[in-house]
Amino acid sequence: MPDQNAIQKKLIDELGLSNLSQDKQEQLLIKMTEVVLKRIFVETMEKLSHDDQEAYNQLIENKATPEEMEKFLAEKIQNYDEMVKKIVEDFKEEMKKQ
């Protein structure tokens, strides 16, 4: 996955938020990140089978690392990385229209 700071900087630039104070930028980024993560989670759960959802929950309970979670999802969902990128791009386009 790309560097989170680079993604955030790109979002700030693309959405024209660079004129806002650092505090406001951080608040908006937190809210936007929450929305994007929820969308990724919902789509991920829709694509996983019932057994894979249980396995995913087991990973969470076992406190799997983010890398282990990503690997699991990439193995279970065809084109997982592309799915995530599309969700992020769609979100950015929505924000640009507002």
Image (cartoon, rainbow, N blue to C red):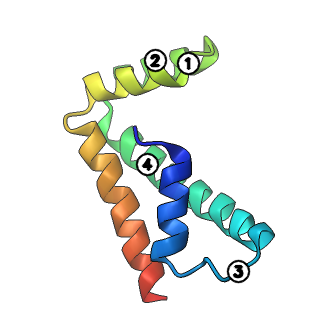
Residue 50, visible in the rendered structure:
no
Residue 88, visible in the rendered structure:
yes
Look at label 3 and name its amino acid. Leu
Q: Earlier in the sequence, mark 3 or mark 4?
A: 3
Q: From the top left corner, tell me how far across and down residue 28 is, in percent.
A: 67, 69
Q: Which residue is mark 2?
A: 68
Q: Which residue is mark 3?
A: 20
* Residue 78 falls in image quadrant: top left
Q: Which residue is mark 1?
A: 65
* Residue 65 vertical placement versus 11 (above, below): above
Q: Earlier in the sequence, mark 3 or mark 1?
A: 3
Labels 3 & 4 near each other (Cβ < 8 A): no
Mark 3 → mark 1, Cα distance in angstroms: 34 Å
**Callout 1 environment at 10 Å: few (<14), some (14 to 19), or many (20+)?**
few
Labels 2 & 1 near each other (Cβ < 8 A): yes
* Residue 15 vertical placement versus 2 (above, below): below
Q: Earlier in the sequence, mark 3 or mark 2?
A: 3
Mark 4 → mark 1, Cα distance in angstroms: 18 Å
- The mark lying in front, picked from 3 and 1, is 3
Q: Secondary structure at mark 2?
A: helix
Please state if 98 lies on the left or on the right of 29 as rendered.
left
**Callout 4 environment at 10 Å: few (<14), some (14 to 19), or many (20+)?**
some
Q: From the top left corner, tell me how far across and down residue 3 is, in percent.
A: 48, 42
Please state if 30 lies on the left or on the right of 84 as rendered.
right
Mark 3 → mark 4, Cα distance in angstroms: 27 Å
* Residue 40 vertical placement versus 95 (above, below): above
Residue drawn where x is 43% and y is 48% of the image:
40
Look at label 4 and name its amino acid. Ile
Q: Secondary structure at mark 3?
A: loop
Q: Secondary structure at mark 1?
A: loop
Labels 4 & 1 near each other (Cβ < 8 A): no
